[in-house]
Amino acid sequence: MSSSDSEDSQVSDEAESTSDEVSGGEDEEHLKIGPSPSDIKSESFVTDVCCHPSRDAVALATLDGDISVHSYSLESPSHELVSFSHHKHPCRRVRFSPDGTLMFSISKDSSLCIADMNTGAVVHHIQEAHESPIYSLCVVDEYLCVTGDDDGQVKLWDYRRQQAIMENKDCDDFISDMVIDDAKKTLLVTCGEGTLSAFNVRKKALELQSELFEQEFLSVAIMMRGRKAVVGGGDGSLSLFNWGQWGNLSDRFPCKQDQAVDCIAAVTDHVLCTGAADGKIRAVTLFPNRYIGVVGSHEKFPIESLSLSHDRRLLASCSHDSIVKFWDVSALHDVRLDPTVKAKEGARSKDINDFFAGFAE
């Protein structure tokens, strides 16, 4: 999804058009999952969600520019914990620092903000952080974050200095997604033009950019204990890159319905969930590359964002319906597929544990 899609004033009409285009496709396996927290309904269109790294709480960014943090629980309804209104234009991304004490956010007005979660105060507000609207955000640690804009510029920030400590403009389209490895050294950046770029954060330099691919690169995740990078494509495919070999992909896995993979959440080292333009959240395994089934959906509305809870047992999602939903993905942690056994075909709706019963333990 391009940078302007989610902020079009006729979101509902576009969503209905998308639904018409994909309707009539083949029926898919719908996995029966366990109980999940109740939905969170927003008065404004939700552009992004991010689960807190240590608490049962989730942050919602909205088209109005507001950010709210809500609790979630199986036992009780969600309630709002704190809200922020420092952005006057659409808030595109919200992220927590690794310890959860800070909240980073970016806006279409090209600003970068950092809020203190203990006091509820905005501690830094960098106006005009980019010349173009900022599209993506990645938090490296308590002091460093990375932003990418609609025109392909990437900036590394040390917010204590109030200025960028690295700038790069090797991309010509919107920076769609970014992820940092566990060592906080390698930053992977996807661009709508169809490239994957690897940056050395410590050296503040671009290491390598992939060749240009025909499809848009929209999302990225690190899998297989840091040995693989998985990129979601505008054509519905997942492109796999060997770690450190960023020039060209090592494998390509077409997903169901050929719907753009707008977001990815790595549930385990070999199981991920994809959020697609047709409103469905799908579970996929790597090595063997298998499509498992549909975890859930936002009906006809494209999936905007996915975020795993701190215990990695719940998946939060948001879409054009202004609703944040939760999905129990705990059973996906136990998936072990035998690469010598062909993928199964069967009933259209099964209990998730029964569905996995025939696979290798």
Image (spheres, helix red, strand yellow):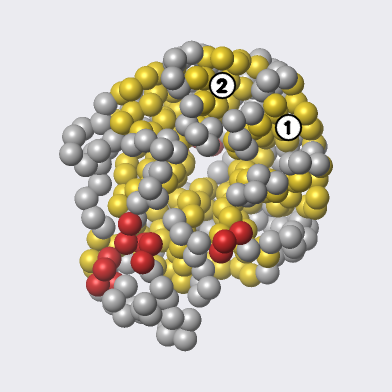
Name above or below for residue 89 compared with residue 258: above
- Identify the image quadrant of residue 303: top left
- Identify the image quadrant of residue 360: bottom left
Where does label 1 land, which residue? 155
The residue at 44%/16% (across/down) is 120
- Among numbered discs 1 and 2, the one appearing first in the sequence: 2
- Identify the image quadrant of residue 109: top right
Q: Amino acid at mark 2?
A: Ile
Horizontally, is 184 left or right of 51 in the view?
A: right
Horizontally, is 347 left or right of 109 in the view?
A: left
Q: Secondary structure at mark 1?
A: strand
Q: Residues within 10 Å of mark 1 (few under 14, many from 20)?
A: many
Specify the label residue 109 is tagged with: none
Where does label 2 land, which residue? 114
Q: Secondary structure at mark 2?
A: strand
Name above or below for residue 45 compared with residue 189: above
The residue at 42%/76% (across/down) is 337
Front: mark 1 or 2: 2
Horizontally, is 353 left or right of 93 in the view?
A: left
Residue 263: image location, x then y, percent? 51, 48
How many numbered marks have been drawn onto this rendered protein structure? Answer: 2
Q: Amino acid at mark 1?
A: Lys
The residue at 78%/52% (across/down) is 209
The residue at 61%/22% (across/down) is 112
Closer to us: 141 or 197: 141
The answer, for residue 281, to whether it is visible in the render is: yes
Residue 261: image location, x then y, percent? 52, 53
**Label 1, label 2: how far apart the Cα atoms are:** 16 Å
Query: Is the residue under label 2 in contact with that under label 1 (CB below 8 Å)?
Result: no
